[in-house]
Amino acid sequence: MRGATEHQYNAPDREEGGFVLVAVLLVMLGLSSLAAAGYLISGTDMKITQNHRAALKAFYVADAGLDHFLGSGKIVADTVTYNLADGTAKVWLDPLIEVDDSTSLFLIHSLGEHGPPEGGAARRHVATVAMRRAVRFNVNAAITAASGLQKNGVAGFVSGLDAATLADCTVGGLNDVAGLAVPEDGFDMSGGGKGKGKKDDDAVPSGFFGDPPILEDGTGFELANGTRVPWQNVLDGTFAEADYVVSQDGYPGFGADVAADEWPVIYADGGDFAVDPTMSGRGALIVREDLEINGNFQWEGLILVGGSLTSNGIEYVDGAVISGLNLLLGESVDETNIGNGNWRYQYHSCNVLRALKGLGWPVEEPGTWFEVM
């Protein structure tokens, strides 16, 4: 008989302890996978948000660039770049169709680009259809000399009888103007008498034709202002963009630089400017100060001169000339002098219209804005 109760202890089940360890490891692995997945999802969501934000800013930049261009009132041949707070917008035009002699349709593109801090670049592209109509100056004579005009001798030919026909353009031949328009008592002629248009019964000098041949009325400022040329805006570039600025680009070579169907705007922005036969061409020639024409110079379109015009030689202008526009700036201007020579200044409404078309501005057509995908 034993004196004490005997206790038995069973050892732990080794297989049971291994299962628990595996289970714990599986749980930890699952939690780690969930954490990694959550991190990846969070990172992906953040990247999507960043991309969306960058694309949205690029969209706003593109739209702002389009607004800037339309607000500038300019038509340009090259791409224009606007540097904005959130990026850059590049704007360019694609011609669509010539509606008529005074109206064109364009597709204006704007490509916006935004560079986010995290790197890369987002781009959005918008466009709209715009119509450009030719501006309407009050061209009331073949030559409008706001500072007066001196003519030497009886040679030469000035006519406000429209040389254009309906075959040239839709307004051709429909509107005769004065041959010469000057302020009151602003016409002097040596070697052939003095004409006064409709102001009195003096004989009109030979070579002057129009409705009337010579128009004398008002002051020089009133005559310049009556042309409706926004001269200050023309000079500072807020009215229209010149295709060629002589001080920067040089004078264009017609037949080389200028396409056969192009009617460019050429701006001589320096001091006095002189042209010769090698510079013959077409379009709108804008001269800030005085203009001197020499030799057999030929021009189709419009010539706008801030100062006086001096004409020497056998030149031919088919369109219209307006001189003395600096009077609108309060400056004094010498009288225009169409000196000796067998020259011809002929009003041509279609050539004037084509030149004015280059000075037109684009106006957005409502409902045509879209995003280019």
Image (tube, grey):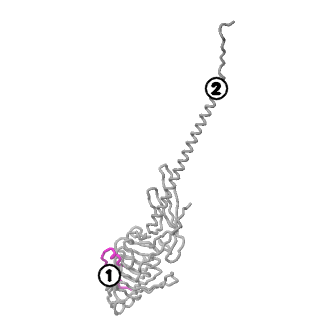
Crowd around label 2: few <14 · some 14–19 · many ≥20 (10 Å):
few
The amino acid pointed to by label 2 is Gly
User: Which label sits on residue 237?
Assistant: none
Task: Say whether residue 61 is left or right of residue 186.
Answer: right
Q: Earlier in the sequence, mark 2 or mark 1?
A: 2
Q: Which residue was labeled with disc 2?
A: 17
SS class, disc 2: helix
SS class, disc 1: loop
Quadrant of the rendered image containing residue 290: bottom left
Image location (x, y in percent) of residue 269: 37, 71
Crowd around label 1: few <14 · some 14–19 · many ≥20 (10 Å):
some
What span is colored magenta in the figure?
323-341
Residue 8 vs residue 255, the one in the foreground: 8
Residue 61 vs residue 204, the one in the foreground: 61
| Residue at the right extreme of this rendering | 1
Image location (x, y in percent) of residue 12: 65, 21
User: Which label sits on residue 219?
Assistant: 1
Residue 51 vs residue 305, the one in the foreground: 51
Check the picture and name the quadrant holding the N terminus.
top right
Task: Say whether residue 160 is left or right of residue 33.
Answer: left
